[in-house]
Image (cartoon, rainbow, N blue to C red):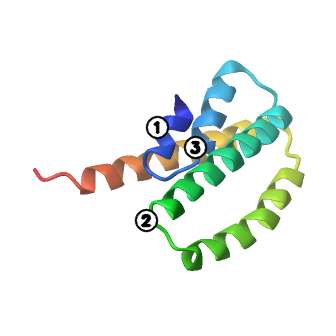
């Protein structure tokens, strides 16, 4: 369900997967690997569908595709202690939620 909701707006859903796994008590290493795999799968499917529908051009995609891989690998190679990892992920998820809410509310006409 998380992938469907995120994919509907052109996102891959890593923050949603991480939040769910964090609440379920999944270990950080498993969270990183699983979230990266799911994110990659949903991003590839979404990108292919957007390209096929003509809503996206390869010219706009390729820089993100090329730069995303090495930085994802770098992030996956970092191993933080749980006492640092969980608070850091919590802050990032809260900031992401505020940004998504701000973006959603800015489109509303009051």
Residue 97 at x, y = what percent? 46, 44
Residue at x 61% of width, y 49% of height: 45
* Mark 1 vs mark 3, CA separation in Å: 8 Å
Residue 82 at x, y = what percent? 81, 35
Up-down relation of residue 66 to residue 85 (above or below) = below
Residue at x 56% of width, y 37% of height: 3
Tags 2 and 1 touching, CB below 8 Å: no
Q: Which residue is mark 2?
A: 55
Dot 2: element: loop
Dot 3: element: loop
Tags 1 and 3 touching, CB below 8 Å: yes
Up-down relation of residue 17 to residue 36 (above or below) = above
First reached walking from the N terminus: tag 2 or tag 1: 1
Tag 3: Cα neighbours inside 10 Å, few (<14), some, or many (≥20)? many
Please identify the residue farthest to the top as the structure is shown. 24
Q: Between label 3 and label 2, give the one nearer the viewer.
A: 2
Q: Which residue is mark 3?
A: 13
Q: Is residue 36 left or right of 7 when viewed as pictured?
A: right
* Mark 2 vs mark 1, CA separation in Å: 18 Å
Tag 1: Cα neighbours inside 10 Å, few (<14), some, or many (≥20)? few
Dot 1: element: helix
Q: Which residue is mark 1?
A: 5
Residue at x 44% of width, y 44% of height: 8
Residue at x 63% of width, y 44% of height: 14
């Amino acid at each position: 369900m998380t992938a469907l909701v995120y994919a509907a707006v052109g996102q891959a859903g890593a923050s949603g997967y991480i939040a769910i796994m964090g609440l379920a008590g999944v270990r950080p290493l498993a969270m990183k690997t699983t979230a990266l795999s799911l994110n990659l799968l949903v991003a590839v499917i979404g990108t292919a569908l957007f390209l096929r529908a003509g809503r996206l051009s390869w010219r706009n995609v390729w820089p993100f595709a090329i730069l995303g891989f090495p930085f994802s690998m770098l992030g996956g190679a970092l191993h933080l202690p749980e006492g640092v990892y969980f608070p850091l992920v919590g802050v990032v998820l809260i900031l992401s939620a505020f940004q998504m809410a701000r973006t959603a509310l800015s489109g509303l006409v009051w």
